[in-house]
């Protein structure tokens, strides 16, 4: 039997554009004895737009001598589909570019290509707007409810968040409800981003319009690891909102024993009363005579503050 030969083809494409850019594309890896290689030629249309034209070349691959007299059958190789296609129209201009962007050897060169291409597509007045905003101008694209920083946080685009912060955007910028990016990351239960924002020095002490801190929200959504992380970053476990509710009140209201214990062993004061005069124990008993009520009551009666987990 003949040895199975795997041949990797690399297709080098030179895009004859005005920018003189280029790309390297991996076509396919496939076992074969004889092959037909389809190469890509580049021609220019009447609108000076590059597109691809195929032409066929035939080559032959010989197996190494294995001492066998058997011959392998010829195999037909189908043309590989290139991965990336970009199609767009602008005032009658139509471009079809076939390339695998993932294999472009230099991201900088690709970004430069996109930059030049877009600048050619922009109208003069559109280009003027771009020139006026070399650095981000968030005032022009923000409302009281929608902040670019908050939107990027909720969509988990950390690199874009960092870019805004590097350009001087306040990481603790609140929206109309007093919520910061950290508040919203916690509400969205995005633990990785919460950690990232805290490392970038987001404050765990900022209160929203109701006086709730990030710790209040972390307790409310049951984010145990975030609660621990906020405490590590010196969040006040006894901070009160506008109604006198501490994070411990919220933990007992949500009937979350694990988070209640974390707060207690990190110094939460179980004797604190809210504006209605109720302690955390009072809240636990308001749920009636069920197992959870007894379990929470036992926790509050027996776990001393500052004990070890």
Image (cartoon, rainbow, N blue to C red):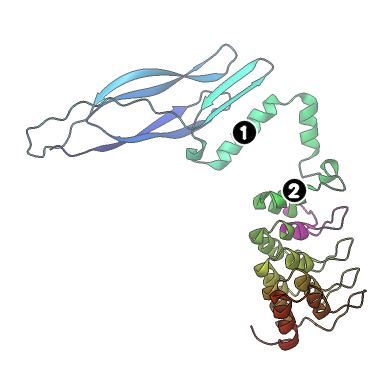
* Residue at mark 2: 151
Which part of the image, by quadrant, shows the N terminus?
Answer: top left
Q: Is residue 30 above or below residue 270?
A: above
Q: Is residue 66 above or below residue 19?
A: below
> Which is closer to the viewer, label 1 or label 2?
2
Q: Pick the residue in front: 197 or 242.
A: 242
Left or right position of 59 against 183: left
Give the SS element for disc 1: helix
Residue ID at (88%, 52%): 176
Compute the Cα span from label 1 to label 2. 24 Å
The image quadrant of residue 74 is: top left
Q: Which residues are magenta?
A: 166-185
Q: Across the whole image, how many numbered discs are drawn on residues?
A: 2
Do callouts 1 and 2 mark residues in contact (Cβ within 8 Å)?
Answer: no
Q: Which mark is residue 114?
A: 1
Left or right position of 302 against 11: right
Which part of the image, by quadrant, shows the C terminus?
Answer: bottom right
User: How far across and down, in percent of the image, does residue 219 sit?
Assistant: 74, 68
Q: Is residue 206 visible?
A: yes
User: Does 173 lie within the magenta span?
Assistant: yes
User: How far across and down, in percent of the image, does residue 186 sit?
Assistant: 72, 60
User: How far across and down, in percent of the image, does residue 279 sit?
Assistant: 85, 79
User: Does 64 lie within the magenta span?
Assistant: no
User: How far across and down, in percent of the image, does residue 165 sit?
Assistant: 74, 54
Residue ID at (72%, 49%): 152
Q: Is residue 232 visible?
A: no
Left or right position of 33 against 172: left
- Of callouts 1 and 2, which one flags the residue occurring earlier in the amino acid sequence? 1
Q: Pick the residue in front: 43 or 83.
A: 83
Q: Is residue 117 above or below residue 43?
A: below
């Amino acid at each position: 039997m003949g040895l199975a030969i795997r041949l990797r083809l690399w297709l080098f494409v030179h895009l004859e554009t005005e920018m003189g850019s280029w790309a390297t594309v991996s076509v396919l890896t496939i076992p074969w004895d004889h092959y037909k290689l389809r190469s890509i030629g580049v021609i220019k249309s009447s609108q000076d737009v590059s597109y691809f034209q195929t032409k066929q070349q035939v080559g032959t691959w010989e197996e190494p001598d294995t001492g066998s007299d058997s011959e392998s059958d010829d195999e037909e190789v189908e043309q590989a589909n290139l991965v990336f296609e970009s199609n767009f129209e602008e005032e009658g201009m139509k471009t079809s570019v076939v390339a695998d962007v993932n294999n472009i050897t230099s991201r900088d060169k690709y970004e430069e290509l996109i930059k030049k291409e877009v600048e050619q597509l922009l109208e003069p007045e559109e280009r003027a707007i771009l020139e006026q905003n070399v650095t981000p101008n968030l005032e022009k694209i923000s409302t009281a409810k929608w902040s670019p920083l908050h939107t990027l946080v909720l969509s988990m685009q950390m690199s874009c968040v960092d870019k805004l912060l590097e350009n001087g955007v306040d990481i603790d910028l609140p929206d109309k409800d007093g919520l910061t990016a950290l508040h919203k990351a916690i509400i969205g239960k995005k633990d990785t981003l919460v950690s990232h924002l805290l490392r970038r020095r987001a404050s765990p002490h900022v209160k929203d319009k109701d006086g709730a801190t990030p710790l209040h929200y972390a307790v409310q959504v049951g984010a145990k690891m975030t609660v621990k992380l906020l405490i590590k970053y010196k969040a006040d476990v006894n901070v009160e909102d506008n109604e006198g509710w501490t994070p411990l009140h919220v933990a007992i209201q949500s009937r979350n024993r694990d988070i209640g214990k974390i707060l207690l062993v990190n110094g939460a004061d179980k004797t604190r009363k809210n504006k209605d005069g109720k302690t955390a124990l009072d809240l636990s008993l308001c749920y009636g005579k069920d197992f959870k009520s007894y379990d929470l009551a036992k926790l509050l009666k027996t776990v001393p503050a500052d004990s070890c987990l």
